[in-house]
Image: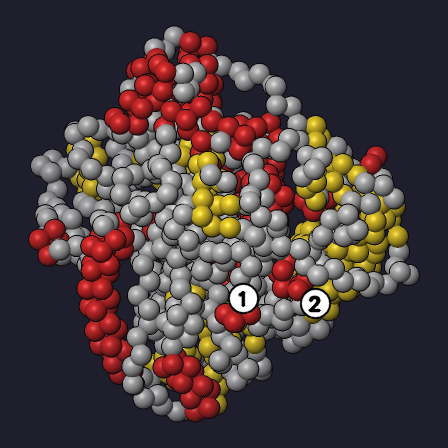
Amino acid sequence: MKLYDYEKKHLRLMRRDAGGCTLFLKRNKDFPLEAPCEIALYGNGARHTLKGGTGSGEVNSRFYVTAEKGLARAGFTITNPEWMDAYDKARAIEREAFIKRIRQEAVKAGMNVATYSMGKVDPEPEYDISVGSGDVAIYVLSRVCGEGNDRQPVRGDILLTKTEISDILQIQANYKKFMLVLNVGAPVDLSPVADAVDNILLLSQLGAVTGVVLADIILGKADPSGKLAATWISWKDHEQIGDFGNQDDTHYEEGAYVGYRYYETAGVKPLFPFGYGKSYTDFSVDASDASVANGILTVDAKVKNIGDYDGREVVQAYVSVPDNKFDEPVKVLGGFTKTETIAAGEEDTVSVKINLSDIATYDTQNARYILPAGDYIVSAGDSVEGTTEVCILHAAEEIVTKDVKNLLDFPDFQDYRPEIKDRKYDTSLPVIELTQEMVPCIKADYDKEEEIDPRVKDLSDEDLALLSVGYFDDSKKGFVIGDQGFKVPGSAGETCAKFEDKGIRALVLADGPAGLRLDRKIGEDSKGVYSYGNPMLNDFMDFLPKAAQMIPGIRLRDAEKRTREGGQIKYQFATAIPIGTAIAQSFDIPFAEECGDIVGSEMEIFGVDVWLAPALNIQRDIRCGRNFEYYSEDPVVAGYFAAAITNGVQKHPGRYTCIKHYAANNQETNRIANNSVVSERAMREIYLRGFEIAVRESHPGTVMSSYNLINGVHSMERYGLITDILRSEFGFNGAVMTDWVVPDMAAKNSAYHYPDPAKVAAAGNSLFMPGSRHDYEDILSGLKIGTVSREQLEINVSHLFALAGNEEDK
């Protein structure tokens, strides 16, 4: 079957631009190759290359290209297919043992095996397969991450296996030219091989075109011009001040010292620092001019290509905030920009803009964001470690950027404070005086009246409660992931369709964030649309008992349903774009907007109204299983990339993003009942700042509240978080929906309860998802006993009506 025109267009764009998401951690002059040749291909990702992660981040694209297929298509002759055949056998043996182990663990944990297995990582096996020798070799190292479970610091996951270490070092010695390719969604500990290997490419997971882009990079047809959006560090040096992965309470004791903020301040040397990355060429960055106007600091830099190849560079601007009143990280990223392609020997001038509110300190005692008095050292360069000082911003007095209220309670600990060291800087640098008049000050208005749609006033209490939950069908027994959509098979859910005859249309919601996740093959007849099966079920199928696996139509790889009489077969092939981390590694805002535009155009094609993405939680710890979906350990990177994706999607009228997961959703372990214990300062400077930037820069249509608790209260039940901060402080004016709250998610004997739908509505959520009769009845009951007021339901539903519009406007 031929590709549709939209597929061709979108795949061409991704092949052209996705190379900018990749980067060399190390390189010499051995690559690029002049032409295809004989090549040896090794590693677990050689044949089993990953296009992305599992869970909501999966996309059911028509196909994707592996490293093996990509190299073959490019004209390479792979010399060692027998090695990959032998690896497949070793992999199959380990897989069988893994499935058996997970089934046993699920029984012991008292959980449904499908839920328990979600996101579980099958560690790489040890094996004994000899490697060869020759001219050119590629080793593709893959690691899978997924929703539902976190990574572990064990061999075959965060750590390399003994076999991987031995093979990589042996291949480096045996071949004249060798490249280690990292087909991963999050850092791995490369310390056993980093010094010995000459060429290390972070390919990441680029969606459908992953293998094609790899071949293009090897041949010099694509420019690996990305930078790290997270610090790569050995496990032994990994910051572990706060804890991670606890069942009930997770203490964010590191405070604001997340990622490079900690490593730079504590003087811990990473393997590869934040913002670092090499392409095929080299650049010099000379930033010597800066100015401030209306709260925006602009840093101008000359960038010269001093290498042998055309390429692009990322200029990053950092600020050292004075620490005479509060402890502060040594550097924080203020802004960045990526050049256009600069020819070898040529130069260009670019400007980096920093919104000073994005680097403001939160003063908990006075409940305000401030720029403390003192000297701000502005530096710029090609990574957090590769900067030179540009100028000094001098604030003679404290500057207030926003007056707010403390709204999130206080933990039972004091945040980590680093040892205070004298910060030396060049006092002869140019000085820019910074005053309150140069920086806008905003005072949050918590008393602003919400507008209520006149149509809402005519609704009964029962109607309001029904509209406050996702559309449900009592005839469907149980919950099946990816099977809650009625209009678009494979969509994640819908809003209530009961009132479409009154002009209030239902919204179709589809998962992400690496493209639309829909069923590939569907049918349509006089009764409507229907699915040939849910591809996501295949992720769980191996873990189910044999009897369950034989249910007709449930296992797509074995059989498919027959077309209903008079039905017509149709296809929903969505484009798998790069994972969130890879998009952020591009440091290319227009590219991110292009990815959003691709998704927005496919939403129009398939009839999807809301895309449940982008995900912009902070990569607090490399063990988080969903870090591949998220952009960065830095909130400025996270916020601006979420905004770019949103702007790309929402340039299509009536199509909206749902930025998620709001907020402090930073581990998968017991995610529905885990309590993030975190200070107000850390919340506001790290975990909420990206959401604030995304709302300010793109006005997303919806926000998804997160599963977890914050300081003992479910985030989705917090009025202060959902309404006061999001609406009154950030200026959000769309609808808020919950993450998908379904049975059998919490760990056995969890200390905390599931969220209460009525309390969730009282906090300002418009939708409790995915919706059930039980949720509806809970809200109706809460309305009767006063847990939630009718006025609040009217406000919530008005937000939903504003998003849905009228049926005739569709």
Q: Are marks 1 and 2 in contact (CB under 8 Å)?
A: no
Which residue in the protein does label 2 denote? 386
Among all residues in the image, which is located at the extreme front? 412
Categorize mark 2 by other alpha carbons within 10 Å: few (<14), some (14-19), many (20+).
some
Q: Residue at the location (40% across, 34% down)?
A: 738
Asked whether residue 230 appears in the rendered view, the answer is: no
Q: Secondary structure at mark 1?
A: loop
**Which badge, 1 or 2, is on the more N-terminal residue?**
1
Marks 1/2: CA distance? 21 Å
Q: Nearer the viewer, mark 1 or mark 2?
A: 1
Q: On screen, 632 above or below 503?
A: below
Q: Say which amino acid is labelled 1.
A: His
Q: Residue at the location (35% across, 88% down)?
A: 131
Which residue in the protein does label 1 denote? 238
Number of dots carrying numbers:
2
The part of the image, by quadrant, that contains residue 768 is top left
Residue in front for this viewpoint, 193 or 53: 193
